Image (tube, grey):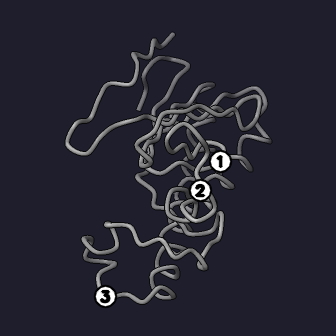
Amino acid sequence: MELSPTTGLIGHDSWADGRLGNGSASRVVLNDYLLIDEFIGLSREERFRKLNSLGDEAAEFIRHLLPKALTRFQNIILLTHVPPFKESCWHRGMVSDDEYLPHFSCKSFGDALADTMKHRPESHLTVLCGHTHSKGEATILPNLHVKTGEAEYSYPRVQEVIEIE
């Protein structure tokens, strides 16, 4: 979607893919796994296979969409739910620990973003995400910046107003 002649908006909701931190050895069980139909009744091994698959699907989608968008726009704003990098996975003012990282981040999506942006130094990507309910920012590459928004259940909030040139 065009926001200005030089700035485009793209997105994918993404899922945590279970690949960062302790990975499938994590003993954390999020409420999501008890409330979301696709996860109800799955063993830990089955759950992590499902998370890996969902992360791979998100990464494949963005590997096709982002380069296409970059042929049209110099600046891209990408909306996604789950933080794509460990450095952008904030919880209570700090980067999430290894037990929670598998459930709070999507490594495969982040890898796809970084791989694409490494070859596009003239372009800029700003990722806006949430999921962890804590605020933070991370610069992954000189042209790849991630802003993680904060919120409370049932109380979404405006994070900032973005001015588009």
Mark 3 = which residue?
41
Given residues 19 and 22, the one toward you in this image is: 22
Q: Toward which corner of the image does residue 109 lie, by quadrant? A: bottom right
Given residues 97 and 81, the one toward you in this image is: 97
Tell me: 149 left or right of 65: left
Given residues 153 and 76, the one toward you in this image is: 153
Residue 149 lies, with reference to residue 21, above or below; the image says above
| Residue beneath the point at 34% across and 73% down | 33
Amino acid type, callout 3:
Gly
Residue 40 horizontal/vertical position (percent): 29, 81
Q: CA distance from mark 3 to mark 2?
A: 26 Å
| Residue beneath the point at 58% across and 54% down | 64
Q: Toward which corner of the image does residue 161 lie, by quadrant? A: top left
Residue 103 lies, with reference to residue 81, above or below; the image says below
| Residue beneath the point at 58% across and 51% down | 96
Given residues 140 and 136, the one toward you in this image is: 136
Q: CA distance from mark 3 to mark 1?
A: 32 Å
Amino acid type, callout 2:
Phe
Judge depth for marks 3 and 1 and give the one in front. 3
